């Protein structure tokens, strides 16, 4: 059996998250496994770098699976994509013996998109959290985001992904807000990169920071929620459609040599890290 690694993109709107669930529940993992089996006539378990929730999207999910394949990597990529639904597609695929997308990962990066629209825009329904008629305080958002940098107990914003694990400490390397004027209003994008994420952590952080940007929660109040680790105080969970898993970072020695610059939206990598 040969191990293949791949970068996977998907629109998660019609799926109950990445992780396989009992049929007929649609999931990303089950769809990719079915496509691999359809091409290779072999049952293969697809391993992901992270589990995205129901309705969450990905540009840079990293996966791996084991199959016997006697043709080229490009042939395998094209064949699997021909079996996948239109809202899921492999972006790149290569042979990578000994690679584990979750255990080898150094960091994950998510982006969350908010649109403060003049009127509800149907074309944004699957891509952003729409806030009609609102304008957020960017300085307040940025001040709250800065409080998340470094190592903290994020127990107020999420729960461990594995039952029984009480560890809610995570390290965040990047936490920032950007904004841009659009025809429909303003677009706010929150980008966060960290070692790993708790269940609902990114969405609950965004929901709470939006309360700061609206003037309904002070910066001190945000700090208090973070410090006290009480999930009952972070009550606003941002909707899933605005969230995208953008990239996963690895040590270069974990990967076969690949071309640089192939994946957008990944900046400020340290010299010892590489993104796929």
Image: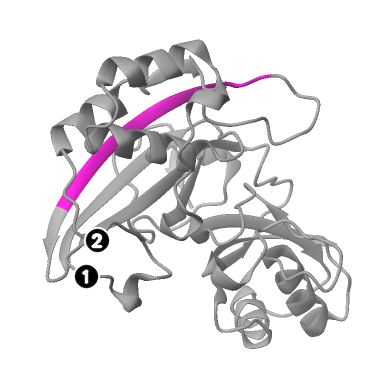
Q: Look at the numbered disc 2 and give the secondary structure of its residue.
A: loop
Which range is magenta? 167-179
Q: Quadrant of residue 141?
A: top left
How crowded pointer 1 is (Cα within 10 Å; few <14, some 14-19, many 20+) is rated as few
What distance separates the C-alpha of mark 2 from that of mark 1? Answer: 5 Å
Against 182, residue 158 (above or below) is above
Quarter assignment of residue 104: top right
- The quarter in which the N terminus is drawn is bottom right
* Callout 1: SS: loop
Q: Are marks 2 and 1 in contact (CB under 8 Å)?
A: yes
The quadrant holding residue 125 is bottom left
Give me the disc on residue 119.
1
Q: Is residue 72 rendered to the left or right of residue 186?
A: right
Q: Tell me the residue at 43%/46% (across/down).
A: 110
In the image, residue 170 lies in the stretch drawn in magenta: yes
Q: For this view, does 136 lie left or right of residue 10?
A: left
Q: Where is residue 47 in the image (x, y as percent from the top left)?
A: 73, 54
Instruction: Tell me the residue at 28%/26% (across/down).
Output: 144
The residue sitting at 54% across, 69% down in the picture is 13
Q: In this view, does 117 lie to the left or right of 210?
A: left
Which one is in front, 175 or 42? Answer: 175
The residue nearer to you, when weighing 208 against 254, is 208
Query: Which of disc 1 and disc 2 is earlier in sequence?
Result: 1
Residue 161: give x, y in percent of width and height: 69, 36
Q: Determine which residue is flagged by label 2.
A: 132
Question: Who is closer to the viewer here, 200 or 233?
Answer: 233
Q: Residues within 10 Å of mark 2 (few under 14, many from 20)?
A: some
């Amino acid at each position: 059996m040969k191990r293949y690694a791949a970068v996977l993109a998907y629109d998660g709107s019609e799926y109950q998250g990445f992780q396989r669930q009992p049929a007929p529940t649609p999931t990303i993992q089950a769809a990719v496994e079915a496509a691999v089996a359809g091409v290779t006539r072999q049952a293969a378990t697809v391993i992901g770098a992270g589990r995205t929730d129901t309705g969450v999207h990905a540009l840079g999910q990293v996966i791996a699976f084991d199959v016997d394949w006697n043709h080229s990597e490009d042939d395998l990529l094209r064949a699997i994509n021909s079996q996948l639904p239109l809202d899921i597609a492999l972006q790149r695929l290569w042979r990578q013996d000994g690679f584990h997308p979750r255990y080898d990962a150094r960091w994950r990066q998510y982006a969350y998109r908010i649109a403060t629209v003049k009127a509800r825009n149907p074309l944004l329904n699957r891509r952003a959290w729409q806030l009609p008629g609102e304008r957020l305080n960017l300085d307040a958002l940025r001040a709250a985001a800065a409080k998340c940098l470094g190592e903290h107990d994020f127990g107020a914003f999420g729960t461990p992904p594995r039952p029984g694990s009480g560890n809610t400490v995570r390290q965040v390397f990047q936490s920032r807000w950007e904004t841009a004027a659009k025809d429909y209003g303003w677009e706010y994008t929150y980008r966060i990169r960290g070692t790993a994420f708790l269940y609902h952590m990114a969405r609950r952080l965004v929901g709470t920071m939006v309360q700061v940007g609206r003037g309904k929660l002070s910066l001190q109040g945000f700090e208090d929620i973070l410090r006290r680790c009480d999930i009952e105080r972070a009550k606003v969970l941002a909707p899933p459609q605005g969230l995208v898993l953008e990239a996963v970072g690895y040590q270069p020695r974990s990967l076969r040599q690949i071309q640089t610059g192939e994946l957008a939206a990944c900046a400020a990598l340290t010299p010892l890290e590489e993104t796929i």
